[in-house]
Amino acid sequence: LDRVRAILKPHPRFFMRPVRFAAVLMASAALALPLALGACATTDVAQSVASAQAVAFEAQRVSDHIRTLADDSFEGRGIGQGEVGEQRTVAYITEQFRAAGLAPGGENGGWTQTVTLNRFEASNVQAALSVGDWTLPMTQGEQVAISTRRPAQGGAVNLADAELVFVGYGTTAPERQWDDFKDMDVTGKVLVVLINDADFEQPELNTFGGRAMTYYGRWTYKYEEAARRGAAGVLIVHETAPASYGWATVRNSWGGPQFDIQHEDPEAVRIPVEAWIQRDVAVELFQRAGQDFEALKVAARSRDFQPVVLENAGFDVSFNVSSSAIRTDNVIGVLRGTTRPDETILYGGHWDHLGMGEPDASGQREVFNGAVDNASGIAAIIEIARRFGAGPRPERSLVFMGFTAEESGLLGAEFYASNPLYPLETMVAGINIDSANVYGRTTDIAVTGHGQSQLDDYVGQAAAGLNRTVTPDPRPEAGGYFRSDHFPFVKRGVPMIYAGGGTTFRDEPVQPRIDARAEYGRTRYHQAGDEWSPDFDYAGMIEDMEIWYAVGARLANSREWPEWNTGSEFGPVRAESASGRQ
C-alpha cells in the first residue's frame, strides 16, 4: 500500500475524478500486489504504473466481448454444426489476442492448434424397457437421453432385450477396497448406475472422502469403466441433486452430436450405448422387477454391495449413427518471457458452447449462446492478456488459450495436453477461467479443488490484497474439479487454479444477486437462456480478474514452482518430470 500511495502521490488530478481514480487504484494495486508477494521487481515503477493505468480492467470492454461472442450470429459457438459460427469465434479471439500484443502461439507460427475429433450423431432413436409383459416406450429427450461415441458397424446400433444389471455406482476403486461389480461378468449387458459417489447421500461414511465428488462420481468414469468391462451400454439414473443439474441439461447436452478424440481401438474405450434415464423411470423399472430402488440405493453405499440382475427385465434400443472426422481449433497466443521463455504460465478457458438445437415445427432453431458459459471466461482471458501485453515483458512466458470442445468432454484441452506445444514439465502452473461471476462483488473467492496444491496460498495472498478471503469449493459434491479444462492438465501433474466468484455478496441489494445466480443454475445453464444481459454486474468478475492477474504476474516474474500438497493423487505424476525443472 505504501508503494501504491507513493505511485499516486504525484498525480493529484486523479482525486478530482473519482471514477478514473478508482480504476487507476485497482490497476496500480494489481501491479503492486505481485511485488509485495515476492515477485522480482526488475522493471521501472513509473513504466509499470503507466501501463497499468492504460489497461485497467473495464466493465464495458468485458461486456462487449461477452455480448459479441454470445450473439446469435456466432451460432452458439458449436463445433461441427456448420463453419460460420466457429470461424467467427476463432477469428474474433485471434484478433483480440493480436490486439492485446500477443504473438501467435499455435502450430507452424500460427494462432491455432488443429484438433481432430470424431463426430457422432444418433438419429431415429427407438427405445423401450420391459419386464415380462410390461413395456415402457421411451422418447428421446423425455424419459431417456441416448448417445454414442463409438463407430457403429453398418451405421446403426441395435440391442434387443439386453439384460439389465444394477451395479450401484459402477465403481472399481482398489485403493479404497471398493468393487461394485464383484466377480460378475457384465459383457454384453446394459448397466444401470447411480450418478455421483457412494458418499453423496451419506457423507459421514467417508468411503470416498465425504460430500466432495471424486472422479469415480463423474458420468465420464461410469462409461469408461463399463467399456473396460465389455458392457453394451449404461443407463445412468438422473437425479438433480447428485448430478448437480436438471434433466434439461441432460437433454440439451446429450441430445445432439457427440464428439471424441480419435482412438486407435475405440471398442476398447467406448460402449455402444451411453444413456441417461429419468429417476421416475428407474423407480418403476425396479418395482416391476421386484426391487425397491431406494433400498438398493442404500445398499449401494456399502463395500459389501452385490450387483443385482433385474429379473425378466430387458432393454431394446435402436438408432442410426452417422460418424465423421471434423477439425476444430484451439486458439493460442503467447507473450514470450525475457529470461526464461521455456517456462510457461497458462491462462485458459473454453470458447465453445452447445451450438444450435434441432428445428421446431416452424423451422426455427434455438441458439445456445453460452454468455456466462463461457463467453465470460474468454472475455476475462482477453482482457488479462491485454494488460500483460501493455506492460513490461515477464521473465517467464505467458500462454493464453481458448480451448475447443469443452462441452463435449474437455476434448480441446485433452487434445492439447496429449499434444502440447509447450512442454508440460516446464509449465509452471495454470489458471482456468470458466463461467465468471456476473452477479456482483463477493467478500470471498471460491477455490474448486481447494487443498490440492500450494496454489491455494497464492490465491489467498492475492485475495487478501483486495480485502477478500478464500472459501473452499462450496459445492464439492458437484464434481467441478473434474468438469472443466484444467483437469486434463491436472491429471498430468500440472498445478492448476480453478477459482472465481464466492459465497457472500458484498453490495446491496444482496438477495436479487443470490436469486439471479440460483436462477441461472436452474433455468439457464446449458439452455437457450444463457444470454448476455444488460443487468450483468461485472464488479465481482473484475475483482476476480485482479486476482488471476496478480497470481500470474507473481509466477511469471519469479523462480517459484508451486507443488502439489502431500497426499494429492496428482503429486506423483508431477514428480516424474522433476528433473526437467530447475
Image (cartoon, grey):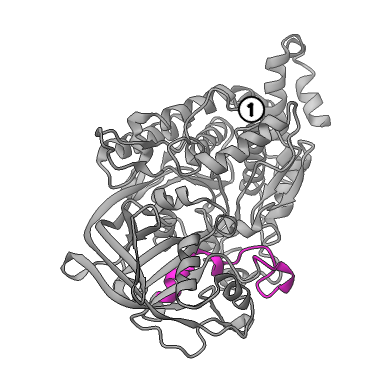
Judge whether 574 appears above or below 338 on screen.
Answer: below
Tag 1: amino acid = Ala
Q: Position of residue 273 (x, y in %)?
A: 33, 67
How many dots with numbers? 1
User: Left of 7 or right of it: where is 354?
Assistant: left
User: Left of 559 or right of it: where is 430?
Assistant: left
Q: Quadrant of residue 455?
A: bottom right
Tell whether position 561 is magenta: no
Task: Tell me the SS state at disc 1.
Answer: helix
Work out which quarter of the rendered image holds the C terminus and state it: bottom right
Q: Position of residue 271 (x, y in %)?
A: 34, 71
Q: Position of residue 311 (x, y in %)?
A: 42, 82
Tell whether position 208 is magenta: yes
Say if residue 373 shows up in the picture: yes
Q: Which residues are magenta?
A: 200-226
Work out which quarter of the rendered image holds the N terminus and state it: top right
Q: Position of residue 198 (x, y in %)?
A: 62, 71
Label 1, on which residue?
52
The extreme front residue here reads 133
Give the residue displayed 24% in from the left and 68% down from the top: 157
